[in-house]
Image (cartoon, coloured by chain):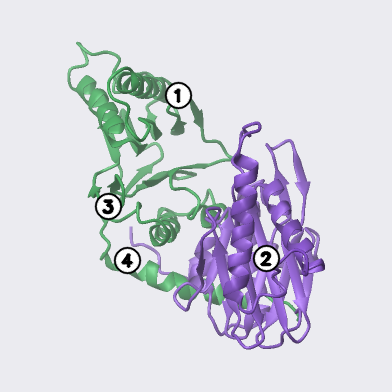
Chain colours: A green, B purple
Amino acid sequence: MTYAVGMRLSRGLVFMSDTRTNAGVDNISTFKKMFSWNTPGERTITLLTAGNLATTQAVVSLLEERTKSPENRAPSILEAPTMFQVARIVSKALKEVIEVHSRGGQQADSAFHATLILGGQIKGGQSRLFLIYPEGNFIEAGDDTPFFQIGETKYGRPILVRAYDPNMSFAEAIKLLLVSFDSTIKANLGVGAPLDLQLYDEDSLEAGRKERFEAEDPYFKTISESWGGALKHALEQLPDFET
Amino acid sequence: MTYAVGMRLSRGLVFMSDTRTNAGVDNISTFKKMFSWNTPGERTITLLTAGNLATTQAVVSLLEERTKSPENRAPSILEAPTMFQVARIVSKALKEVIEVHSRGGQQADSAFHATLILGGQIKGGQSRLFLIYPEGNFIEAGDDTPFFQIGETKYGRPILVRAYDPNMSFAEAIKLLLVSFDSTIKANLGVGAPLDLQLYDEDSLEAGRKERFEAEDPYFKTISESWGGALKHALEQLPDFET
């Protein structure tokens, strides 16, 4: 399992993803699910992955190889003129990998499916955020739906829906995401720390701050431990039902 | 879809269930999913249902018929000497209905499965709370896992896990459940008001208070509308990440 969120704020983009992968409960590992490409002053691109690990690693390797010798392996996400074109390249790569893995050969118990969140900005355009489906099509975040979740999305969704504000600071967004991730980690063994964070300042065209929160990270622990009390307190503030 | 919760408190049992059923998003109806039987001074039994509606209605009708002419149709849940025996009767009825519906005949798109929460008390024993699986086996709530959820359980789970307290009053429990249901209703169109509530005072052996919360119920609306603000406020109370 996986949990990852990409969020559009007025001041830029925020990405967070967990690192746990599992095939059954007795075969768990830690893998990065957040990948970034950056040409300073020109473009910055971040990808979050959920789903079959062989699929998502193959997609990232394909994209990565092309960026390294783009003359041989066009199209490259570092050459595409717009984020929409980047989304098309990534979604095409995803569709192809799934097709190749699914065709012939042994059938796997689980599907080869994967879902991706793609965000970034290219000079001349605004930052954009996409959700890419295993079928190879994608949708874009807008003002009405300003964030995307992939993987185990349900436990962490109510707090995002209630507390998201497009004008929140990065610090507030990180706090909100850690609460959402903490609720998910507490409920699903397939989601686990460390958590990767990536910020992107709108129009900076530079890779923003990266952070990794280990399970023992003091700030993450503070949030996790204080949230239970804060929730109970919030509940107490609401009027009781008159029995 | 469905969302229903049965909860054990030190002062008794609390049950809440939604009433929406759907076969696709264009075929929604309202059906009660909470059923109670009561012999004042002797026993009180409550059943919550999730899953295939034909299955759950058949189970309830079977149990109901037997209670009305127990001399012909033993075993009756109004005759069983203990809650454990009641759970065995209900789970056997569930298993039989699923078997009959599944055998031969047309295959349905959806399975005939259903999951039940059963709670109550019989004179001479304590109140007990069970989760009954479609396979016909069941588990009982204990101090470590004092509540059961069935149906669309994920959205409403984090607040239950964080704020449940065995010593809370019925009024507090109702508030907690309404928040949990509200989070679920906001996220899944297959869960909807009105919400049915049933309370049971430990050792009373009387049917406790029943309540139905319509979508426009003033208290439910207050909780729903205040909770967003209360959550935001709770989040603000936590320390910001230092960027």
How far apart marks 4 and 3 lie (CA) works out to 12 Å
The front one of A121 and A5 is A5
Residue under pointer 4? A219
Asked if A222 appears above or below B56 in the picture, the reply is below
* Amino acid residing under circle 3: Glu
Residue under pointer 1? A135
Q: Earlier in the sequence, mark 3 or mark 1?
A: 1
The mark closer to the camera, 3 or 1, is 1
How far apart marks 1 and 4 lie (CA) works out to 38 Å
Mark 2 falls within which chain? B
How many neighbours does mark 2 have within 10 angstroms: few (below 14), some (14-19), or many (20 or more)? many
Residue under pointer 3? A211
Q: Secondary structure at mark 1?
A: loop
How far apart marks 4 and 2 lie (CA) works out to 44 Å
Q: Secondary structure at mark 2?
A: strand
| Rendering coords of residue A105 (x, y %) | 27, 20
The front one of A56 and B238 is A56
Q: Earlier in the sequence, mark 4 or mark 3?
A: 3
Q: Which mark is residue B47?
A: 2
How far apart marks 1 and 2 lie (CA) works out to 42 Å
The front one of B124 and B205 is B124
How many neighbours does mark 1 have within 10 angstroms: few (below 14), some (14-19), or many (20 or more)? some
Asked if B9 appears above or below A67 in the picture, the reply is below
Q: Earlier in the sequence, mark 1 or mark 4?
A: 1
